[in-house]
Image (tube, rainbow, N blue to C red):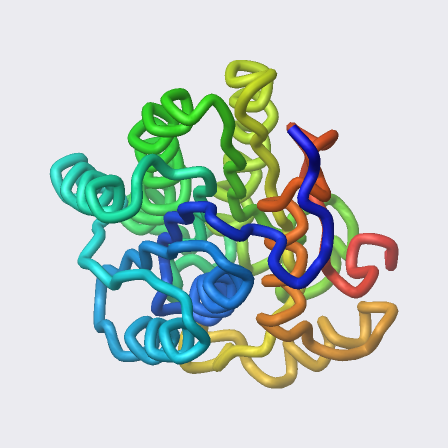
């Protein structure tokens, strides 16, 4: 197969499944995929407004896709969503596991961790990623190819140990560490026909205090510990996902790409 390199339509004719498509990263990736020629299934657990807006933009540009309910922790919900996508567009080529828990309970110090909250982030971020892979890999094997992109995180990568954002994110760091390990193991299992990689974003533009309970003071401290001195944009993470989804990364699997403004280089 001749690789389709960057001609502005890197995923032309592909079928992409995107979880967490109502979030900042998921919606940005879904839009990028749709604008470059993929048919996109946008999975949403709560609220469809952002995903519907993204789908409108894709269709205005001549693309296609659909928005549907998806609970990545529920096998029946996953099957319904994945089957609908397959019935509409054919087997999936690309899976973006962007769904993840956002809750201040995941950013507490060790002695404040609640076991139920610990289970919840692992259920969504780790188990949900695994269940989506199980469902979509069946279709990718039918295709004879595929690219899976999981989401880990730069937090907890072993540097900046004194930074408040790292020290209060133990549940989040543990779950994302599990995703990294899962990605490497799955890449071995699915080679050579299906590639599996992960992205570890650094601090990205979001409502950190409202969504995570992380104060502006702590975020300012985190920004001071990045080489570029700014928050990342969802569109920058989407561009990384486009690379991993496309044939441009056809010789890459089992990798975890740090897109974090040098966060992990500063100690």
Residue 174 image point, x, y percent: 52, 41
Q: Nearer the viewer, residue 142 or 251?
A: 142
Task: Tell me if 189 is positioned left or right of 222 in this view.
Answer: left
Classify 44 as above or below 95.
Answer: below
Q: Nearer the viewer, residue 243 or 11?
A: 11
Q: Is residue 260 visible?
A: yes
Residue 99 image point, x, y percent: 38, 54
Residue 136 image point, x, y percent: 34, 33
Q: How many marks?
A: 0
Quadrant in the picture for residue 115 = top left
Quadrant in the picture for residue 266 = bottom right
Q: From the image, which quarter does the N terminus lie in? A: top right
Residue at 74% x, 44% y: name it: 158
Classify 133 as above or below 186.
Answer: below
Classify 51 as above or below 78.
Answer: below
Outermost residue to the bottom: 216
Q: Nearer the viewer, residue 8 or 171?
A: 8
Residue at 50% x, 65% y: name it: 25
Q: From the image, which quarter does the C terminus lie in? A: bottom right
Residue 200 image point, x, y percent: 64, 51
Residue at 60% x, 42% y: name it: 198
Classify 60 as above or below 23.
Answer: below
Q: Is residue 155 visible?
A: no
Residue at 57% x, 38% y: name it: 177
């Amino acid at each position: 197969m001749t690789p389709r390199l960057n001609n502005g339509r890197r995923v032309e004719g592909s079928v992409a499944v995107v979880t967490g498509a109502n979030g900042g990263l998921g919606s940005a990736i879904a839009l990028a995929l749709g604008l470059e020629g993929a048919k996109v299934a946008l999975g949403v657990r709560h609220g469809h407004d952002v995903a519907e807006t993204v789908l409108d933009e894709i269709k205005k540009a001549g693309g296609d896709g659909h928005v549907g309910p998806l609970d990545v922790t529920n096998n029946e919900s996953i099957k319904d969503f994945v089957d609908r996508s397959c019935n509409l567009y054919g087997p999936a080529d690309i899976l973006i596991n962007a769904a993840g828990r956002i809750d201040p309970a995941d950013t507490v110090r060790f002695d404040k961790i609640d076991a139920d909250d610990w289970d919840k982030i692992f259920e969504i971020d780790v188990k949900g990623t695994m269940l989506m892979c199980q469902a979509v890999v069946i279709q990718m094997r039918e295709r004879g190819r595929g690219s899976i992109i999981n989401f880990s995180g730069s937090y907890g990568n072993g540097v900046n140990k004194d930074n408040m954002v790292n020290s209060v994110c133990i549940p989040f760091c543990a779950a994302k560490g599990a995703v990294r390990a899962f990605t490497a193991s799955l890449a071995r299992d699915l080679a050579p026909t299906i590639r599996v990689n992960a992205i570890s974003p650094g601090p990205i533009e979001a409502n950190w205090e409202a969504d995570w309970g992380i104060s502006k003071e702590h975020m300012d401290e985190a920004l001071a510990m990045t080489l570029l001195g700014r928050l990342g944009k969802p569109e920058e993470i989407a561009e990384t996902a486009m690379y991993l989804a496309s044939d441009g990364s056809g010789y890459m699997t089992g990798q975890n790409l740090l897109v974090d403004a040098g966060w992990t280089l500063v100690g």
